[in-house]
Amino acid sequence: MTNNRTQNTAIAFSDEQAMILESAKGFCRDRSDITAVRSLLNSDNGYSGDIWAEMVALGWTGIAIPEQYGGSELGIGSTVPLVESMGRHLLSTPYISTTLASQALLRGGSEQHKAHWLPLVAEGSIGTMALLDSEDWGATSTSCNLSADLELQGTKLLVNDAAVADFFIVSANHQGAQVLVLVTADQLSSEALSKKVLIDETKRACSVNFSGVKLRADAILPNSEAALRDSKLIGALLTAAEATGSTAAALDVVVAYLTSRIQFGRLIGSYQSLKHPTVEMLIGMDSARSFIYHAATVVGDEHLDQDAEIACRMAKAQATDALLFAGDRGIQFHGGMGFTYECDAQLYLRRALWVQHQYGDAQHHRLHLANLLLD
């Protein structure tokens, strides 16, 4: 039996979101075709600095930043269509990492933090969140510690875009509480970063050793608890938006193959055993799209309420499953060729496997949704 906490089903698509989506679709299509994606797989940073500069010039890094700090103040919901388009064309940049870091500052930082860093983010500075170390998503603490004299001890695993970050928002235990602290790249030693190979080769991450970094008291975000909770939920939403776009792309690859490959004198797309799973991909993608835009509607600049939490968790659970199914079927439908590195279908399964471990997998979010929705 469900209770009245499930009544908010609002979904809206603003004029601003429509303009961003239209602009982003053209930009990502032109700058990130499959040849461009593959050309960056073995690059150091995994993205083009020129494309990042163009995104900054278009004002995308300031979409969710208030006008007083150099942004356009369109709200975090307006980043969803942009991230969805990036996912559809596998355009990987530090955009999600930086947006989450700026949201943590906006929601938990002091006025000094905001006044200094948010204008820099709008101008193209890169930030990232260093949350995950040895704990799983069910844990309530971290193994990274901040001592009484404000010295960090601990290593964070798989920090997205760490190699190019100008600043890090790091979760740590301090005096019996979990806090977020701001660490700049120049505070790290030359050996602090260790690059890691990810299943999704369009992405980049490092393990970062923060041990020995000494901080000032004003490096601690004063509203850390709220910022940490909101950042994880917004991280789930933006990852879901990217995954939804990638699901649409995987579906395009499947449909193109089914409508061109002839076997035994027939297009293989005419077989019901392939038609039905393809329809399931479409339904899964459409459902995920509804969830991410519902979440974009209810997620605001204030502390996220229960409706927003439910929406973000639903979006991540659905988008995660939709992309995993589409990526798996895409490889299976291509037969033996689907298992080769040259087949583009494998890019989407790799993305799906990476998405599972970003801000909670489907099982993690459904566990929390059960507590939120069921009596």
Image (cartoon, grey):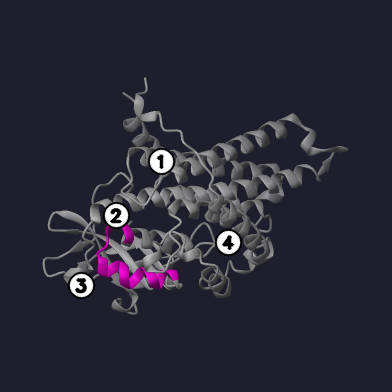
The residue range painted magenta reads 106-122
Task: Give the crowd class for mark 4: few <14, some 14-19, many >=20 residues within 10 Å.
Answer: many
Q: Please say whether residue 200 is visible from this viewpoint.
A: yes
Residue under pointer 1: 313
Q: Secondary structure at mark 4?
A: loop
Asked if residue 93 lies left or right of residue 106, the reply is right
Disc 1 marks which amino acid?
A: Arg
Q: Residue at x 46, y 46 (%)?
A: 296
- In this rendered view, identify the residue nearer to me: 361 or 108: 108
The residue most toward the right is 265
Above or below for 199 versus 55 = above
Residue positioned 69% across, 42% down in the render: 333
Residue 122 percent location from the top left of the image? 44, 69
- First-in-chain label (2 vs 4): 4
Left or right: residue 157 versus residue 199 is: left
Q: Quadrant of residue 92?
A: bottom right
Magenta segment includes 110: yes
